[in-house]
Image: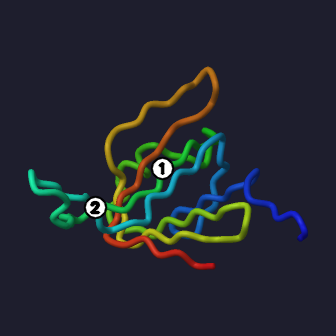
Amino acid sequence: MAATRIAGTAFFKLDGVQYSVEGTLNVQPMSIMREGRVGLSGITGYSERPMIPFIEVEVTKTPELSMKDIERVRDSTITGEAADGTTYVLRNAWFAGETSLDLGEGKATLRFEGLECVEVA
């Protein structure tokens, strides 16, 4: 069996504009979480609750990366592409949480949450 590349490169785009990935690109494509339920008489089943899909990325701070523009993201399309060619598309995404620039290292971690994240093989 031939070796397959599974890691090493990643690409991040915000509304079609590609930004440099500094270190990490994390994707949470799931929309539901299931948790096992157990009572005194044993396992009774599971509960299910919604989750918010997200893409979180550590990007290089370049002149093209405006933190004010990132702050205004409210209904965007975010894509993350893995080394194996799988692409994740986060739709109707908004900038979530907070971030700070590490000016010494020239990077920032950005988190986007959305209504749906689909996997495109």
Other residues around mark 1 within 10 Å, as few (<14) / some (14–19) / many (≥20): some
Q: Is residue 2 above or below residue 121?
A: above
- Residue 87 place in picture, x, y as percent: 60, 71
Other residues around mark 2 within 10 Å, as few (<14) / some (14–19) / many (≥20): some
Mark 2 or 1: in front is: 2
* Amino acid found under the numbered disc labelled 1: Glu
Q: Quadrant of the N terminus?
A: bottom right
Relative horizontal placement of residue 109, taking residue 81 as reference (left or right): left
- Find disc 1 in the rendering and name its residue: 56
- Find disc 2 in the rendering and name its residue: 51
Relative horizontal placement of residue 71, taking residue 65 as reference (left or right): left
- Residue 6 place in picture, x, y as percent: 74, 59
- What residue is rendered at 25% in x and 58% in y? 35
- What residue is rendered at 58% in x and 62% in y? 80
Query: Which quadrant holds residue 9?
Result: bottom right
- What residue is rendered at 73% in x and 61% in y? 83
- What residue is rendered at 65% in x and 40% in y? 23
Q: Is residue 64 above or below residue 119?
A: above
- Residue 21 place in picture, x, y as percent: 65, 48
* Amino acid found under the numbered disc labelled 2: Met
Relative horizontal placement of residue 115, taking residue 86 as reference (left or right): left
Query: Which quadrant holds residue 61?
Result: top right
* SS class, disc 2: loop
Query: Which quadrant holds residue 106?
Result: top right
Looking at the image, which residue sits at the far front? 41
Q: CA distance from mark 2 to mark 1?
A: 15 Å
Looking at the image, which residue sits at the far top? 104
- Residue 22 place in picture, x, y as percent: 66, 41
Label 2 vs 1, first from the N-terminus: 2
Residue 42 has which mark?
none
